[in-house]
Amino acid sequence: MTPFFQHSLIQRPMPIYEYACGACNHRLEKLQKFSDAPLADCPACGQPALTKLISSSGFQLKGTGWYATDFKPGNK
């Protein structure tokens, strides 16, 4: 396999952005590249009123060495 071909098979994660429409309160998620321009037009009402939401990601740290597993009161 050539290095170019191997490189093209690598999947790069793309973030899921959340948007909300200021006109009709429609909410949506969009899988976009970092370099993609933010969405502007709402797919529900057609108005250019979409804003990108700031949301937290959900993850859980596995293993030991973390506060929840080793240092939290009552875990011993």
Image (cartoon, helix red, strand yellow):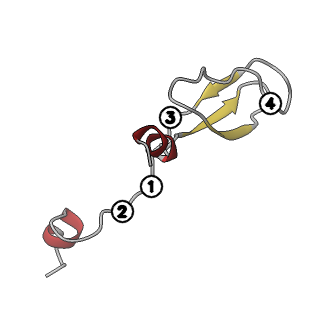
In the rendered structure, the answer to whether residue 1 lies left or right of residue 67 reads right
Splitting the image into 4 quarters, where does residue 75 fall?
Answer: bottom left
Would you name the residue on which mark 1 appears? 58
> Which of 62 and 3 lies nearest the eye of the viewer?
3
Under mark 2, the amino acid is: Gln
Secondary structure under tag 1 reads loop
Secondary structure under tag 2 reads loop
Above or below — where is 11 with respect to 23? below
Q: Do the residues under discs 4 and 1 have CB atoms within 8 angstroms?
A: no
Measure how far apart labels 4 and 1 are at the Cα level: 27 Å
Q: Disc number at residue 54?
A: 3
Q: Do the residues under discs 1 and 2 have CB atoms within 8 angstroms?
A: yes
Splitting the image into 4 quarters, where does residue 44 fall?
Answer: top right
* Front tag of 2 and 4: 2
Indicate the position of residue 62 as horizontal and vertical percent values: 29, 68
Indicate the position of residue 21 as horizontal and vertical percent values: 72, 29
Secondary structure under tag 4 reads loop
Measure how far apart labels 1 and 3 are at the Cα level: 13 Å
Under mark 4, the amino acid is: Cys
* Front tag of 4 and 1: 1
Would you name the residue on which mark 2 appears? 60
Residue at x 52%, y 23% (from the top left corner): 35
Would you name the residue on which mark 4 appears? 24
Q: Quadrant of the C terminus?
A: bottom left
